[in-house]
Image (cartoon, coloured by chain):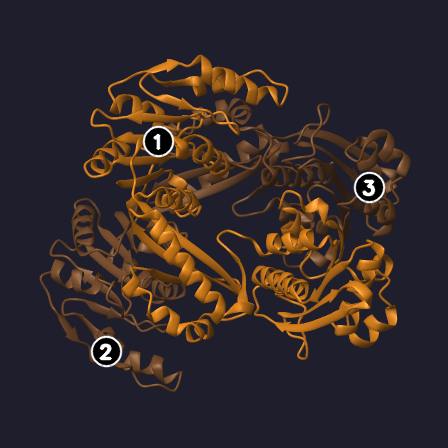
Chain colours: A orange, B brown
């Protein structure tokens, strides 16, 4: 089965935003077993949408469209789709009720400007949007092809895709299987990794398995892919290769699939019944944010002191003024004191601390921008610390130091 | 002048990576004055590229292609383009020299696997790639349309675009100007905003100005666009409309163009010489992260207490146990105590605090998931707090509460 994705929005075509919806949907369709032939971005224009949808339906069994569903007049998708299918817009009581519910959350009635949100093409099945006023829409062509229209706001689109679209596509189409296994590594560069697994990698092609390297912020994801009808056999084959891979690089693998490093650390803490706090300087709360992004993190995460200013390091974390003066805020002495004191003050089993120079300014000759000290404090007075040197880009330095800190704790928890 | 972008690569179509090249090129083309009609992603397939390039050249004056230029056999762009233009691959001494230079950096000679890298279609102008072995290629059709082929690796593609492609396009085409102004609003929904500015909006069309609404996480961006030859006149007209817009919705505008809300708040703090701290429960450090993402934030941001566990609220922020027991951690009493104590402990002029239920669990009937109390403490004992009700999605609740908190402070700073 072939699928295509069409995203609508001038903001994509002028380069104002990255089209992340297409990636998300491509991934969804691929996992369902579709072959995604093409992804297309077009402007909010009736003729453009009509022509390109027609072209897509010449070869695709399923077309997913996102965008152009807002209440404002530059949003043309609904009207265009009604015309395309020779249908017309009608009021949907079901959608109206849902739109009422959305506005009721803010203690409001539906404003006149949003009345249009519950008008939908008569020939579609509306899909309930829990997060916004634009419903999704499900159309079937005479030949049985499926066209789905979803709002462009990523969070609304994703929730609709997961709750409404995926289950419907699964039961509507008989699909082959695209299987992927993604193994997540950290602490090893792409080329070193390639050398470590070269023997293993060379045998994959003959088995019908494709391998891709996806490096990002100091981590490398390894993705194995297969396509076919015998799901069990393929799963077995992939499992076998993953097991072999673990033997080649045991200490670099921190998880599989979409596991976040913070989530992996959280799972280990939960398993071991241990708690965590953080003391952050240059990462500015980002480690705490990464940890608390996961539901259930309150079971092991107690809190963080973001000691951005030296006063906060002294007042809240009891770092000695003399240590800051003698060694500087970015030093082994200070970062270890931060971890030990966070652990004590926040009454946790472990504490992570980071002190560094995120940049772009603030570097010196001996401590250039990108320098970061990271420490882990643990039970029975355990303390360890390590020096890292990153580049000159502020956000990248924050992300990398965060991943390095989480990985240091992960390795400690595995010991 | 019309332009189109074609990106080639299976990794895009299975959703393995986000296609950031398209956004970059769309932005480049838009700024040069092209109208980007379409952006397309296709697989590494000769027929797919041939068909789609043909289709693109039916309406486009310029087509930029990225990807499919590596040394491996699934990279088909060069051969396909040679065939498309009825040309053939020849060895280029110029490209060979450059490829030799690239390998020499690693102390290597060109390996046999990379000999193909200096074969190029006879009818193209090679564009020098300083960062990799695949040259860019510049083709002109018989009608004078331009086709540019660039490598898919973002760093190589970007350097080539900037050094080689942009100057050539500028001198080859006589282009109009695309001008945009983006005004950022917060604290008002899309439909309410529409009603507030309807009079202003209705007059735009006659002036040749397009307006787009771009909602995201509780903020709405308003983008004004114009196209024409008289750049100065258009800039003046846009400036005039932006000024008028400020009169309609003064309190909702927090910035322009790429300004982040946290950056806007930072600018206000800097201007007023005031400092800030945060006390975060459900936002888990995300407010601190947003603030410290900006260079120079250490001038006004002193730190944060992420008091995720109630112990941390009591031990680090002096929140009374009796208040937590009586009113709950998510209450006006507790959130105000958090802000007042963060301000005091971290010795700042202002403090933001948030206490809420991010979800998906932890809600009660009276305080469902999505409930958040936000407080701002300021000079002279000033304290204000507000109750917000969001939805059921954890990350969205964290993002929205963060934006609401930053906006509350922004409004306070503007008073």
The image shows residue B161, relative to residue A369, as above or below, that is above
| Residue sitting at x 79%, y 76% | A327
Name the mark nearer the viewer: 1 or 2: 1
The reply to the same-chain question for discs 3 and 2 is: yes
- Give the alpha-carbon distance from disc 1 to disc 2, as whole Å: 49 Å
Q: Earlier in the sequence, mark 3 or mark 2?
A: 2
Q: Element type at marker 3?
A: helix
Please indicate whether residue A86 sits to the left or right of residue A183 in the image: left
Name the mark nearer the viewer: 1 or 3: 1
Give the image location of residue B119, x and y in percent: 19, 73
- Give the alpha-carbon distance from disc 3 to disc 2, as whole Å: 66 Å
Q: Element type at marker 1?
A: helix
Closer to the camera, A202 or A233? A233
Give the image location of residue B395, x and y in percent: 59, 41
| Residue sitting at x 87%, y 39% | B381
Residue underneath mark 1: A171
- Give the alpha-carbon distance from disc 1 to disc 3, as whole Å: 51 Å
Residue A145 occupies which quadrant of the picture? Answer: top left
Please indicate whether residue A407 sits to the left or right of residue B183 in the image: right
| Residue sitting at x 16%, y 53% | B47
Residue underneath mark 2: B115
Q: Are there few (<14), some (14-19), or many (20+) residues within 10 Å of tag 1? A: few
Disc 1, disc 2: CB below 8 Å?
no
Give the image location of residue A238, x and y in percent: 39, 57
Give the image location of residue A280, x and y in percent: 72, 59
Q: Element type at marker 2?
A: helix
Which quarter of the rendered picture does the C terminus of chain A lie within? Answer: bottom right
| Mark identifier at residue B338 | 3
């Amino acid at each position: 089965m072939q699928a295509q994705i069409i995203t609508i929005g001038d903001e994509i075509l002028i380069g104002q935003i990255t089209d992340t919806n297409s990636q998300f949907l491509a991934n969804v369709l691929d996992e369902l077993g579709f072959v995604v032939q093409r992804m297309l971005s077009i402007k909010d224009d009736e003729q453009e949408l009509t022509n390109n949808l027609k072209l897509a339906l010449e070869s695709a069994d399923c077309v997913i469209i996102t965008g152009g569903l807002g209440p404002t007049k530059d949003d043309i998708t609904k009207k265009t789709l009604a015309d395309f299918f020779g249908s017309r817009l009608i009021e949907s009581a079901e959608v109206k009720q849902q739109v009422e519910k959305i506005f009721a959350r803010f203690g409001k009635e539906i404003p006149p400007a949003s009345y249009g949100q519950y008008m939908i093409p008569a020939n579609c099945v509306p899909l309930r949007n829990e997060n916004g006023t634009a419903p999704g829409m499900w159309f079937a062509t005479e030949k049985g092809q499926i066209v789905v229209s979803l709002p462009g706001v990523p969070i609304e689109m994703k929730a609709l895709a997961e709750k409404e679209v995926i289950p419907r596509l699964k039961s509507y189409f008989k699909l082959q299987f695209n299987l992927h296994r993604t193994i997540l590594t950290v602490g090893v560069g792409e080329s070193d990794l390639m050398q470590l697994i070269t023997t293993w990698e060379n045998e994959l092609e003959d088995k019908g398995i494709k391998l891709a390297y996806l490096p990002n912020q100091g981590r490398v994801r390894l993705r194995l892919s297969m396509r076919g009808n015998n799901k069990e056999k393929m799963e077995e084959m992939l499992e076998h290769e993953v097991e072999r891979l673990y033997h080649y690089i045991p200490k670099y693998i921190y998880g599989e699939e979409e596991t976040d490093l913070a989530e992996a650390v959280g799972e280990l803490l939960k398993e071991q019944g241990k708690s965590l706090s953080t003391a952050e300087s240059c990462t500015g709360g980002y480690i705490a944010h990464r940890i608390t992004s996961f539901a259930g993190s309150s079971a092991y995460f107690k809190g963080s002191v973001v000691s951005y200013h030296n006063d906060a390091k002294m007042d809240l974390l009891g770092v000695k003024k003399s240590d800051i003066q003698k060694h500087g805020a970015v030093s082994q002495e200070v970062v270890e004191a931060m971890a030990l004191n966070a652990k004590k003050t926040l009454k946790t089993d472990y504490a992570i601390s980071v002190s560094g120079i995120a940049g772009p300014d603030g570097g010196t000759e001996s401590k250039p921008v990108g320098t970061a000290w990271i420490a882990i404090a643990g039970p029975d007075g355990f303390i360890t610390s390590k020096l890292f040197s990153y580049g000159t880009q502020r956000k990248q330095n924050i992300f990398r130091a965060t991943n390095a800190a989480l990985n240091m704790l992960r390795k400690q928890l595995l010991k």
